[in-house]
Amino acid sequence: MSGNAVQFHYAARSDVGLVRSNNQDSGYAGANLLVLADGMGGPAGGDIASSVALAHLVPLDTDSHPADSMLPLLREALLDAHEELTDRSSRDRDLEGLGTTCIALMRSGNRLAMVHIGDSRAYVLRGDTLTQVTTDHSFVQYLVDTGQITPEEAEHHPNRNVVLKILGDAQADVAPDETIREAVVGDRWMLCSDGLSGLVSPETIGQVMADFADPGECAEELIRLALLGGGPDNITCVIADIVPAGTYPPAPPQIVGAAAIDRHAKSRGGEGAAARAA
């Protein structure tokens, strides 16, 4: 069935959490594109950073791109966002240190392309099996990969929030991880910020993703569980089911978090925040 035409059935949800005063996450779900960005850089920088990332990526949500163009287009959009962020931070001291993680999942026909930088995560549920598709670009993941600590120790490590690669860091390598996959009917994809993955176990994530048929209700339940865990960070979740084409009528894209609030200066990636770029 995976060879037939497919579509995304999607939802995006975001919550500021119980501690932070503003939401620095941004999320997008559309017919051909999912994006999750977790911004950082103090009260003024993180929300701008994640919004800029979306502003450069959201215009790619069309059905006109051939499959072999997806990775080059995503790569170029990330590089453009990175250059804009480094330019902004160099010109405005209030924005020094701004940056953002980013995951983008793009569909063309029955193919999926994904780019990823930072410690936000992508999961896919296939049947009863949940798989973490991305590898965190984080200090604790480096320690795990080099055998210095166990995955269990990483969950409680004091430096678990240290990210090694983000868009906007002029000193770091910003080449994203890249993959091409088949869009398999029945798969459920989920992109999330560490405000969710850091508080809700993979076992619970998999159970909720299997139990809630509606993507929006599933995202809301996952956020509710993260809030029950204390909600110390912003929490954003973007979910899409791979279903046969024509199962659902066309739906408008959903933009959540910082990018949904049109209050920033214009981005070179679009007319203002990503909400306008859509």
Image (cartoon, grey):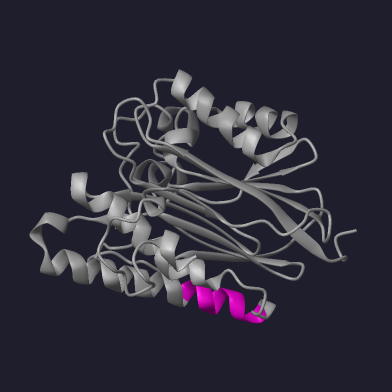
Quadrant containing the N terminus is bottom right
Residue, far left: 93
Residue at image x 88%, y 65%?
4
Task: From the viewer's side, name the closer residue of 56 and 113.
Answer: 56
Query: With respect to residue 68, does 223 lie above or below?
Result: above
Task: From the viewer's side, name the closer residue of 88 and 143.
Answer: 88
List x then y, in percent, for residue 92: 11, 63
Task: From the viewer's side, name the closer residue of 25 and 112.
Answer: 25
Q: Is residue 147 left or right of residue 222?
A: left
Q: Is residue 209 left or right of residue 145?
A: right
Whether residue 150 is visible here, answered yes or no, is: no
Query: With respect to residue 165, does 69 lie above or below?
Result: below
- Prevailing SS of the magenta stretch: helix
List x then y, in percent, for residue 87: 20, 72
Is 176 covered by the magenta stretch?
Answer: no
Task: From the viewer's side, name the closer residue of 15 and 95.
Answer: 15
Residue at image x 62%, y 73%?
62
Whether residue 246 is visible here, answered yes or no, is: yes
Residue stretch rendered in magenta on the structure = 68-75
Marker count (numbered): 0
Residue at image x 16%, y 57%?
95
Query: With respect to residue 213, does 99 lie above or below?
Result: below
Q: Is residue 249 left or right of residue 42?
A: right
Q: Is residue 87 left or right of residue 248?
A: left
Q: Quadrant of residue 210?
A: top right
Is 70 covered by the magenta stretch?
Answer: yes
List x then y, in percent, for residue 253: 58, 57
Q: Quadrant of residue 49?
A: bottom left
Residue at image x 74%, y 38%?
129
